Image (tube, grey):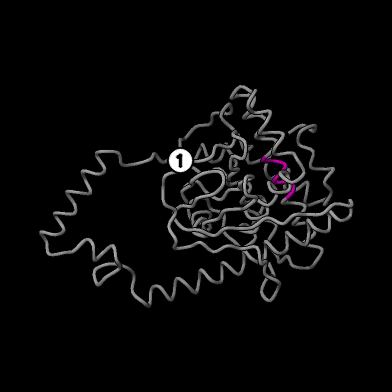
Amino acid sequence: MRWKGRRQSSNVEDRRGEGGGGGMFPGGFGRPGGRVRLPMGGSRSAGGGLSGIIVLVVLFFVLRACGIDPLEMLAGGPTGGPTTQQTTTTSAADDEMKQFVSVVLAETEDTWKGIFEAQGLNYKEPSMVLFTDGVRSACGFASAASGPFYCPGDQKVYLDLGFFNQLARQFGASGDFAQAYVVAHEVGHHVQNVTGILPRFNEMRQRMSQAEANAMSIRVELQADCFAGIWAHYTGQKGLLESGDIEEALNAANQIGDDTLQRRTQGYVVPESFNHGTSEQRRTWFARGLKSGRLADCDTFNDPV
């Protein structure tokens, strides 16, 4: 994607390095204002409890006995923290990635502002929060392990830039336009939110069985994929796409399909548990938005998925 030198969004909050902290439970997708996230392979349980505290206490005294001051390590003293050279290198790469996602967010702003204005509406731009490890949002606390997500409660997209490394290495979806697709998908959820689609779904979900909620969730996610395709359609019209960009986005959509993720993480597929859509469905709906650039072609609630 030809992004360098283009406008960067001013709606980016950089909270990297602040630490997420605890004390809040994750917001569920089905709760009012619950976060909407990309699926991630596998699962991670919350660690700790009493046994975790005991381990930490024992480790503290073992380190002291070895002549190492744990408090100094936590403070980033001589025995803790990266070297200046490592920090500089990491910061340079992170800064470029921040610039990239800021440009992508700006491009989504221009696209959706134009689409809304054509219908006599105003587009309220979302913010993007960059974080590391964990973050608090209006939807609760989330760790980086949960992946990128959109929180309707504060109308913000949350992203740990380290996810892009995981996307490439673990999921086999590399390339800057694969990363752009992730951002555009989460912004697609914002479009659903400000147009009333997401609030309506969260309201309906309270009265649904788990199977019904999963089926409806798939339609919500596929529409966000289609909206990402609409953004790619107009990005292509600007001449910003390079050879292989669309293939990168389609591959990313394929690699994070429910069936592909389940085969990778557990070796078998449980269709009843799908809530984002199969790889084929995700590719199809992204391609549909890409081809037409029309909101009317992203009606996943009435068209077969």
Of residues 132 and 229, the one nearer the viewer is 132
Determine whether the residue tagged by mark 1 lies in a helix, strand or loop. Answer: loop
Residue at the image position 70 percent from the left and 57 percent from the top: 246
Residue at the image position 84 percent from the left and 48 percent from the top: 294
**Residue 66 % position (x, y):** 11, 61
Seen in the picture, residue 37 relative to 7 is either above or below; the reply is: above
Q: Quadrant of the N terminus?
A: bottom right
**Residue 172 % position (x, y):** 53, 53
Q: Is residue 36 left or right of residue 115?
A: left
Magenta residues, dominant SS class: helix
Q: Quadrant of the C terminus?
A: top right
**Residue 97 % position (x, y):** 56, 67
Chain part drawn in magenta: 221-227
**Residue 41 % position (x, y):** 49, 42
Q: Is residue 242 found inside the magenta-colored segment of the image?
A: no
Residue at the image position 44 percent from the left and 53 percent from the top: 20
Amino acid type, callout 1: Gly
Residue at mark 1: 42
What is the quadrant of residue 233 in the picture? bottom right
Of residues 259 and 201, the one nearer the viewer is 201
Of residues 282 and 118, the one nearer the viewer is 118
